[in-house]
Image (spheres, grey):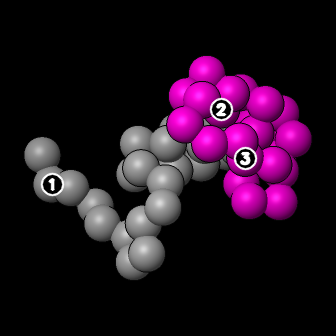
Amino acid sequence: MNKIKFERNKTSTFIVMYSLYMYFLGLSLRSTSKALVIFRDDKRNHVSV
C-alpha cells in the first residue's frame, strides 16, 4: 500500500482521510471534529477540520 505524505504533517494521514470520509458522508465540520475525539492525540476544533 502506498503511503500518502503531506507537507508539514502534524496529523496522521489516517485521521485526515477518516475525517474527509465523514465530512463527505454528510457530517458537519463540528460533528466531524467531535467524532475525532476517539483518537485523543490532539483536540481538534471544527476550524482545523
Q: Is residue 34 magenta?
A: yes
Which residue is painted at 50% across and 42% down in the image? Answer: 15
Q: Is residue 40 visible?
A: yes
Specify few, some or many for label 1: CA neighbours under 10 Å numbering under 14, 14-19, or 20 or more. few
Q: CA distance from mark 2 to mark 3?
A: 8 Å
Is residue 5 shown above or below 43?
Answer: below
Residue 5 in the image: x percent, y percent? 30, 66
Name the amino acid, label 3.
Arg
Query: Mark 1 and mark 2: span between their CA atoms?
Result: 24 Å
Left or right for 32, reference 31: left
Find disc 1 in the rendering and name its residue: 2
Of marks 2 and 3, which one's residue comes earlier in the chain?
2
Residue sitting at x 83%, y 60%? 47
Q: Quadrant of residue 26?
A: top right
- For this rendering, which residue is in front, 23 or 16? 16
Q: Are marks 3 and 1 in contact (CB under 8 Å)?
A: no
Element carrying mark 2: helix
**Is residue 9 or residue 17 the one in the foreground?**
9
Residue 25 screen position, x and y as percent = 69, 36
Q: Amino acid at mark 1?
A: Asn
Q: What label sits on residue 25 in the rendered view?
A: none
Q: Which mark is residue 44?
A: 3
Residue 25 is at least partly visible in this image:
no
- In the picture of the structure, the residue carrying the numbered disc 2 is 36
Residue type indicated by callout 2:
Leu
Toward the viewer: 47 or 2? 47
Mark nearest the camera among 1 and 2 is: 2
* Image position of 13 with respect to 36: above or below: below
Q: Are marks 2 and 3 in contact (CB under 8 Å)?
A: yes
Q: Which residues are magenta?
A: 26-49
Residue 22 % position (x, y): 65, 36
Q: Earlier in the sequence, mark 1 or mark 2?
A: 1
